[in-house]
């Protein structure tokens, strides 16, 4: 899973000998119907589905429009804290740890 807002680079497939091999973009989310990623191109002001993407560990908010786009990408409602804690408790039971002798 990648963090929304991470800088990524799309592999450019139709290039000539001296063209750039990658184009800088920002990760916005996952496509539900295919294994593609949704990426935002700030210079084109467009969101596209791309499969060949290389991610960096850097978060880069180019301008306010990117932040607004990232906020609108969070369409899933967040669960309340108490429900999330009970789900984690069932998934990860607490074990007693005993040091070896």
Image: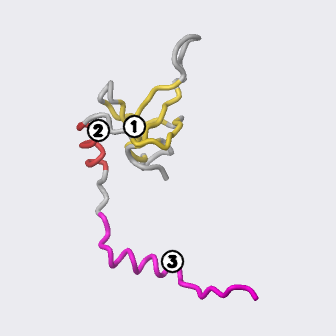
Does 89 appear in magenta?
yes
Image location of residue 52, percent across then percent down? 54, 35
Would you name the residue on which mark 3 appears?
91
Image location of residue 45, percent across then percent down? 29, 29
Tag 2's secondary structure? helix
Q: Quadrant of residue 95 in the image?
A: bottom right
Tag 1's secondary structure? strand
Q: CA distance from mark 3 to mark 1?
A: 33 Å
Image vertical order of residue 5 relative to residue 23, above or below: below
- What is the tally of numbered marks visible in this picture? 3
Q: Which residues are magenta?
A: 78-101
Does 54 appear in magenta?
no
Q: Tell me which residue sits at (49%, 53%) in the image.
A: 1
Q: Earlier in the sequence, mark 1 or mark 2?
A: 1
Q: Residues within 10 Å of mark 2 (few under 14, many from 20)?
A: some
Would you name the residue on which mark 1 appears?
26
Q: Quadrant of residue 98 in the image?
A: bottom right
Would you name the residue on which mark 2 appears?
66
Q: Residues within 10 Å of mark 3 (few under 14, many from 20)?
A: few
Q: Are marks 3 and 1 in contact (CB under 8 Å)?
A: no
- In this rendered view, identify the residue nearer to me: 98 or 64: 98
Q: Earlier in the sequence, mark 2 or mark 3?
A: 2
Q: Earlier in the sequence, mark 3 or mark 1?
A: 1
Q: Residues within 10 Å of mark 1 (few under 14, many from 20)?
A: many
């Amino acid at each position: 899973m990648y963090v929304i807002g991470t800088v990524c680079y799309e592999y450019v497939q139709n290039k000539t000998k001296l063209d750039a091999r990658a184009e800088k973009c920002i990760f916005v989310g996952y496509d539900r119907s295919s294994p593609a990623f949704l990426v935002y191109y700030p210079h084109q002001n467009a969101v596209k589905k791309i499969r060949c993407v290389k991610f960096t560990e850097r978060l880069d908010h180019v301008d306010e429009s990117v932040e607004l786009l990232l906020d609108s990408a969070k369409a899933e409602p967040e669960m309340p804290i108490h429900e999330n804690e009970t789900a984690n408790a069932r998934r990860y039971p607490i074990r007693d740890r005993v040091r070896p002798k």
